[in-house]
Amino acid sequence: MSLQMAPLPLLLLLVGAAWSYPEEMRYPCAFIDTANITGSFGMDGSYVHNWTVIPRNLVAAYDFVIENGIRVPAPKHLRGCVCKLKPCVRFCCPEGEIYDLESRQCSAPSIDSLPPPRHSHMEVQLANGSLKELELRSRFSIYVDTPCEHMKPVTKVSEYVHWTLHENGTIAHRGHIFSKHYCYTPLLQHNAASSPSSSSWDWQPLVCAPEKLHFVLGVREWTYAICLLISIISMIIVLVVYLMCSEMRNSFYGVAIKAYTICLILGYALLGYLALHNPATLSKAACRIIPSLTLMYLVLSFYILSFVSFKLYLSFHGVVFTKLMFWLMFTPIVLIAIGWSIFVGFSRYGNRLVFGGDTCWFDPRNWSIMVYLFAPVFVACAISGFFYILTLIYISEQPVIETEKSFESIEKNRFKSFWKYFGYTALVWLVCVCSFAFNYYRGERSLHNYAVCFCMAFHGFAALYALIGKNQQIQNFLRRIDNDEDTCENSVPLSSF
């Protein structure tokens, strides 16, 4: 084999050894060399499995299974080291079927092709170096299963390599040993040298091929980042206006809106960063910390809105917040968001890390974003909606009192402008949820589309419209600024007198 071919089998061997070593320190053999013997007949401390007697020293209780090369916790069950007693041969599919490399599943060959070979016989290299067609069941333990969801052959210059099965169960080619995490399947090869139309089946071992999510930086990703930038600029304008307005600067409502805009600015900025950067260029620590911070800011922003909804409800009941009450209620919200982001950063979904895999953000191939982002957002929206309904009921039951008309108009205006913005926000995130579900069922490996991109920009404009344009206190503040500027332009300097 040439040098181009050599590194791959060596890598496969090292990976197999890495999987096996820690297991063999605690267990009699590696997981791949075992079989589940739970319920098998036992006698004198030994077990009988498929007419093979397994001694007690080769039996252990395993509390895990290996799926796609990942150790997954499982209920304790007995496993015996069958492959240590009798060499194992693994086939991908039942007899009469082949492993389709495109669909990545077992299927019957086409009617026009030759029938695939049976599992009964295979060419084996004996200890003396000679090759002989042997009956497998008399010398090997045969298993039918794929060790991983996705399997692929090892090729050299787009041609299959002729791997040889040895008498001791190993598979080798010119001194390079194949990984134990394999399965055999017959593949049809065309013999162009003898006849262009002639073809024959050849047994090929397939290796685990983890599905990689390739990074794409195209027009859609740039559009998404630009729309996030538009929303960030809009939120910055809202933040600056609320900082300048003296009536909003120190009020609890104003402080909450400023905290909300800061969270959204940072969250959207990190989202844009993740959309434009290849996960392969980021370190493992950065690929966990950045998305965890992004999740924290986004979730915290929604629970700040829930807090504002609760505060507006209490305002109509005449409840006044002190600074101590405000921070006693606001601090737990922040701690919950921080704790949730840390929990997600170390969690697994479908045997994969939520953050730090093929993509630094949520994996679009599973439903992790629904569980860890959209679910807490939905809970926050439900809490806000609950207090919105209670506030509407309270307002409808109260008579209009002339002495409180001015105060009531401010609170009602604040209430209406806030809930207009909340409605737009809920609409934007509903589009995000629907777009993800649509992409998932269509098989598109992306969390967003152009609808999500434009909704991100719309979210920023909605903040300008509702939180500034429809807020009476902010409008009065902006009018005073405009009037002061007009007065300064038309006034006469004092020095002239």
Image (cartoon, helix red, strand yellow):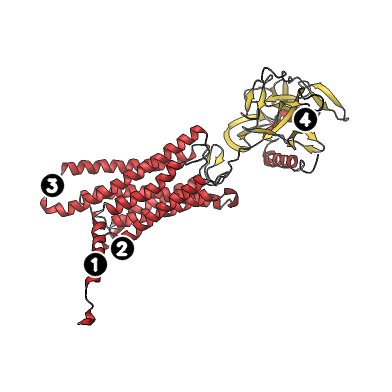
Comes first in the chain, label 1 or label 4:
4
Q: CA distance from mark 3 to mark 1?
A: 37 Å
| Residue named by callout 1 | 486
Comes first in the chain, label 2 or label 4:
4
Mark 1 vs mark 2: in front = 1
Mark 3 vs mark 2: in front = 2
| Residue named by callout 4 | 169
Comes first in the chain, label 3 or label 4:
4
Res 315 seen here: no
Under mark 2, the amino acid is Met
Q: CA distance from mark 3 to mark 4?
A: 89 Å
- 186 w.r.t. 288: above or below: above
Comes first in the chain, label 3 or label 2:
2
| Residue 465: percent from left, percent from top | 31, 51
| Residue named by callout 2 | 244
Give me the residue at 50% from left, 33% from top.
442
Mark 2 vs mark 4: in front = 2
Is residue 150 rendered to the left or right of residue 273? right
